[in-house]
Amino acid sequence: MNDLVLEFPAQVKEAMTIASGFEGKLSRDFDNVLICGLGGSGIGGTILSQLIGGESSKPIMASKDYNIPAFVGPNTLVIACSYSGNTEETLEALDSVIEAKAQIACITSGGKLLKMAKMKNWPVIQIPGGYPPRSAFGFSLVQLLKFASSFGLTSIDWESEVHTAVQRLETELAEIQSISKELAIALAYKTPIIYSSNWLEGVGTRWRQQINENAKMLCWNHYYPEMNHNELVGWRTKDENRAVVMLKSNFDHKRVAKRMELSEKVYSEYTSNVHTVNAKGATRIEQALYLIHLGDWTSVYMADLIEMDSTEVKVIDWLKGELSKF
């Protein structure tokens, strides 16, 4: 897994090359967007919606379920993301999407989803297979950005921004690894709590998912300002086994920045393990990729420290095996 994290910038470059070859078109206009996907295949949809939602004239929603919202219909664009192409929740949701006569575009490495896309002539981008889904994030996010641009959801010069982000990840690798190692030491054997602003909620979720799967640890994340209306009240018991990581950005709303500053005073009374990670980059895309890469490194260093195999996900394999019996 360490090698796969190291390859992330190169993967993003390869993903850009793949995206440049996509020339698919939609058959008609649409009014709203639903991105279907789960786990490592689904987090890209959440992050995309938060990266471009503020400038897109059409609402974008990420769905991680067997079911689809009632608004899905002929004027909806549904983007199905399944790395394997065999994610049962996404495939079942697609049955309802087809029945609703929505437009469909796909991102996958193969499986049933790729066969359906080719058979039904849906716009599709095929990405390389053979990776753990969580390690193919660079492939899927770049293709989502490509779809967003091709289908008129964003006018951001995302290719330039991604290129700049990759340059930073490569040139600042040693610093990123150093920060991640320090964080890993602080978080190992504790319960990590990841806080961020709303626009980085998906990035915070990515941190949680990577700590779950790579370090085999429980973790939770929440975002501002919502957590000020509920979770902040839960800080009542001193517990040094809790470790807070605050993901901060200069794109955070000024009132959110003040809320984070004041809230830190509250939970610092109950744990001394409070750490801040400041995003780097001139754009939201650059900052998101920086934080994601730093979080990925942190999770694998945590796995090393507590002597966990960061690649194995036996319990997920067991669950899929049991579900296949029904």
Image (spheres, rainbow, N blue to C red):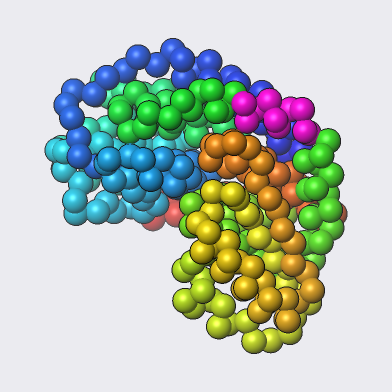
Residue 166 part of the magenta segment? yes
Indicate the quadrant containing the N terminus: top left, top right, bottom left or bottom right.
top right
Using residue 86 as the reference point, say whether residue 195 is left or right of it. Answer: right
In which quadrant of the rendered view does residue 259 lie?
bottom right
Residue 290 part of the magenta segment? no
**Which one is in front, 245 or 314?**
245
Using residue 53 as the reference point, say whether residue 97 is left or right of it. Answer: left
What residue appears at the point 74 percent right and 27 percent down from the top-left corner?
A: 170
In which quadrant of the rendered view does residue 222 lie?
bottom right
**Which one is in front, 126 or 256?**
256
Q: Position of residue 184 (x, y in %)?
A: 80, 55
Indicate the quadrant containing the C terminus: top left, top right, bottom left or bottom right.
bottom left
Asked whether residue 98 is in view, the answer is no
Q: Position of residue 2 (x, y in %)?
A: 76, 38
What residue appears at the point 44 percent right and 12 percent down from the top-left corner?
A: 21
Residue stretch in magenta: 164-173
Tell me: residue 266, above or below residue 111: below
Tell me: residue 104, above or below residue 253: above
Using residue 305 as the reference point, say whether residue 276 is left or right of it. Answer: left
Using residue 240 as the reference point, say whether residue 288 is left or right of it. Answer: left
Number of marks: 0
What residue appears at the point 73 percent right and 81 percent down from the top-left corner?
A: 269
**Which one is in front, 278 or 324?**
278
What residue appears at the point 62 percent right and 73 percent down from the top-left corner?
A: 262
